[in-house]
Amino acid sequence: MKFAHIACAFGRHSVDRSAVRRVHGGQVSRCKHCTTPLEESMPHHWTAMYVRDAGLSGRRL
């Protein structure tokens, strides 16, 4: 198992800088290793996005 996947399991995602997009005034991207959707909450600080789970509940991916 790669160390990057272990880091993602602990919440230390790496932002894919080539896939950063602007959406509604903010920036969004995905993790390079596990493709978790990330959003920039503060400058240079990325957090996992809150995603609706098929209308049943909300969760963080």
Image (spheres, rainbow, N blue to C red):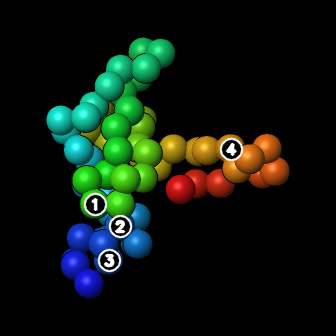
Nearest-to-viewer mark from 3 and 1? 1
Give the image quarter of residue 6.
bottom left
The answer for how far apart the CA atoms under marks 4 and 2 are is: 20 Å
Note whether 49 is above or below 2 in the view shown: above
Identify residue for label 3: 6
Q: Amino acid at mark 1?
A: His
Q: Which residue is mark 1?
A: 33
Q: Amino acid at mark 3?
A: Ile
Judging by the rendered image, the residue that carries numbered circle 2 is 8
**Nearer-N-terminus badge (4/3):** 3
| Crowd around label 4: few <14 · some 14–19 · many ≥20 (10 Å) | few
Sequence-wise first label, 2 or 1: 2
Among the two numbered marks 3 and 1 on one chain, the one whose residue lies closer to the N terminus? 3
Other residues around mark 3 within 10 Å, as few (<14) / some (14–19) / many (≥20): few
- Mark 1 surroundings within 10 Å by alpha-carbon count, few (fewer than 14), some (14 through 19), many (20 or more): some
Helix, strand, or loop for circle 1? loop
